Image (cartoon, grey):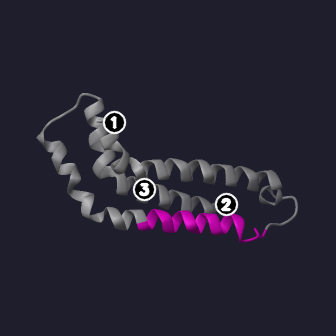
Amino acid sequence: MPTFKFKNSLAAGALAAIGASVCCVVPLVLLMMGIGGAWIASLTALEPLRPWFIAATVLFLGLAFRRLYFQQPVCEPGTTCSQSSVLKHQRLIFWIVALVLLALLSVPWLAPLFL
């Protein structure tokens, strides 16, 4: 079961990061696609909640990190989770997702450099 809880933490972190960056990423992507209009300004309504989304992202990434590096998985011999390659793959996926989420969170600060 450690894999299931690990996936939950990563999924929750991903959703929180998307929520934190929706005020800035979505309008930027829409403008890059050539879609514009006054309604795009209403997408910034979530900006006051951004610190809470960032905190949730960091919390869930921290929980996934703790589960991967500090808690020993409880597996029966011969099961999939008892193989060391599974843990290596989970750690690799964690770092890829963490880098993508950190990139998403940094968009509001980096976006003015590209405009």
What residue would you read off at disc 1? Answer: 114
Work out how far the residue at label 3 is from the one at label 1, CA to CA, in angstroms: 21 Å
Q: Is residue 42 left or right of residue 16?
A: left
Q: How far from the left and from the top, in percent, is residue 36? A: 18, 34
Q: Are circles 2 and 3 on residues that touch, CB within 8 Å?
A: no
Q: Main secondary structure of the magenta part?
A: helix
Q: How far from the left and from the top, in percent, is residue 48? A: 25, 64
* Among the 4 quarters of the image, the one containing residue 47: bottom left
Q: Report the residue at 22% width, 50% height from top.
A: 43
- What type is the residue that disc 2 sits on? Thr
Q: Are circles 2 and 1 on residues that touch, CB within 8 Å?
A: no
What residue would you read off at disc 3? Answer: 17
Q: How far from the left and from the top, in percent, is residue 98? A: 55, 53
Which type of secondary structure does the marked residue at label 1 adopt?
helix
Query: Which residue reaches farthest left?
Result: 38
Tell me where the magenta segment starts and ends, as one range. Answer: 55-74
Which type of secondary structure does the marked residue at label 3 adopt?
helix
Q: Nearer the viewer, mark 3 or mark 1?
A: 1
What residue would you read off at disc 2? Answer: 3
Front-most of 115 and 5? 115
- What type is the residue that disc 3 sits on? Ala
Q: Report the residue at 46% width, 62% height from top.
A: 57
The crowding category of the residue bearing disc 3, from other C-alpha atoms within 10 Å (few below 14, some 14 to 19, many at least 20), is many
Q: Which mark identifies residue 60?
A: none
- What type is the residue that disc 1 sits on? Phe
Q: Is residue 54 visible?
A: yes
Work out how far the residue at label 2 is from the one at label 3, CA to CA, in angstroms: 21 Å
For marks 2 and 1 on the same chain, the one whose residue lies earlier in the sequence: 2
Q: How far from the left and from the top, in percent, is residue 32? A: 30, 31
Q: Nearer the viewer, mark 2 or mark 3?
A: 3
The crowding category of the residue bearing disc 1, from other C-alpha atoms within 10 Å (few below 14, some 14 to 19, many at least 20), is few
